[in-house]
Amino acid sequence: MLVHLPAVLSKDEVSQVRDLLERGAWVDGAETAGEQAAKAKFNLQIREGSKTAVEAGEVILRALARNPIFNSAALPMRVLPPLFNRYDVGMKFEDHVDGAIRMVVGAGIRMRADVSSTLFLTPPEDYEGGELTVSDTYGSHKVKLPAGDMILYPATSLHSVTPITRGSRWSSFFWTQSMVRDDGQRTLLYELDKAIMDVRAELSDHNRAVVALTSHYHNLLRRWAEL
């Protein structure tokens, strides 16, 4: 399931994050990749756990906490502190699948990566190339979103970033451990949640159909959630 989340960050928040990153130190992105992925990864990153990454990440985490689409689609149990990457001309990330387990720097814990997220920080007109390409059972999807918008997709997906031919593409990326690890089950719950919101807009919260649908949603979540 691919989910587009518009305006996760406001224009002021995008500017705030960009200002922090512009003052930060960029390192070779291969430092945070596994042995296989490092051979396909050609970009720059803000070092994980650095003061810049923590401060910029806090802006994003606060925005996610207030975003109903993220919470409905990802059903987050743990969110890895956001990371930040940069693709300049000629840089790319070839086909790869994200690692299943991530270490949370500074916390001494590991988490399962169920949902991948890319939050765009550069307006699409400022660069050429740099599309996030995600492959699933329905084909290949190219994603290039306005600054402040985010895409969610299953961490099991084969994906890549096409080479930059003009400009520079900056983004944040991170993973979520969901309360529901199966993407098919998460998709059913998300679609049901959206349907309930649509019905609530037409009927009262106390309508029998609304109550029944809401009960089914929570009973499915109760059956599938892992805490």
Image (cartoon, helix red, strand yellow):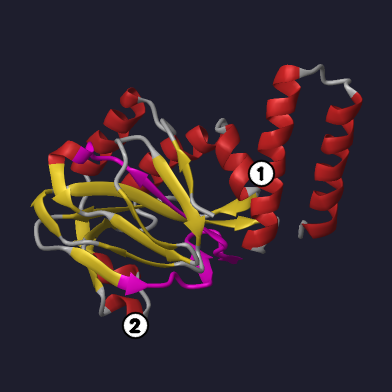
How far apart are the two marked residues, 2 and 1, measured between alpha carbons?
Answer: 35 Å
Q: Looking at the picture, does residue 114 appear above or below residue 210?
A: below
Q: Residue at x 75, y 23 (%)?
A: 200
Task: Name the residue beneath numbered marker 1.
Answer: 191
Q: Residue furthest bottom?
A: 35
Q: Quadrant of the N terminus?
A: bottom right
Amino acid type at image mark 2 = Gln
Q: Position of residue 58 (x, y in %)?
A: 45, 39
Which image quadrant is residue 13 in? top left
Mark nearest the camera among 2 and 1 is 1
Q: Residue at x 64, y 41 (%)?
A: 72
The crowd level at tag 2 (other Cα within 10 Å; few <14, some 14-19, many 20+) is few
Mark 2 or mark 1: name the one nearer the start of the chain: 2
Q: Is residue 97 visible?
A: yes
Q: Residue furthest right?
A: 208
In the image, 213 versus 88, the foreground residue is 213
What secondary structure is marked by label 2?
A: helix
Q: Looking at the picture, does residue 104 appear above or below residue 219?
A: below
Q: Looking at the picture, does residue 139 appear above or below residue 86?
A: below
Q: Position of residue 61 (x, y in %)?
A: 49, 40
Q: Which residues are magenta?
A: 95-124
Task: Name the residue beneath numbered marker 2.
Answer: 36
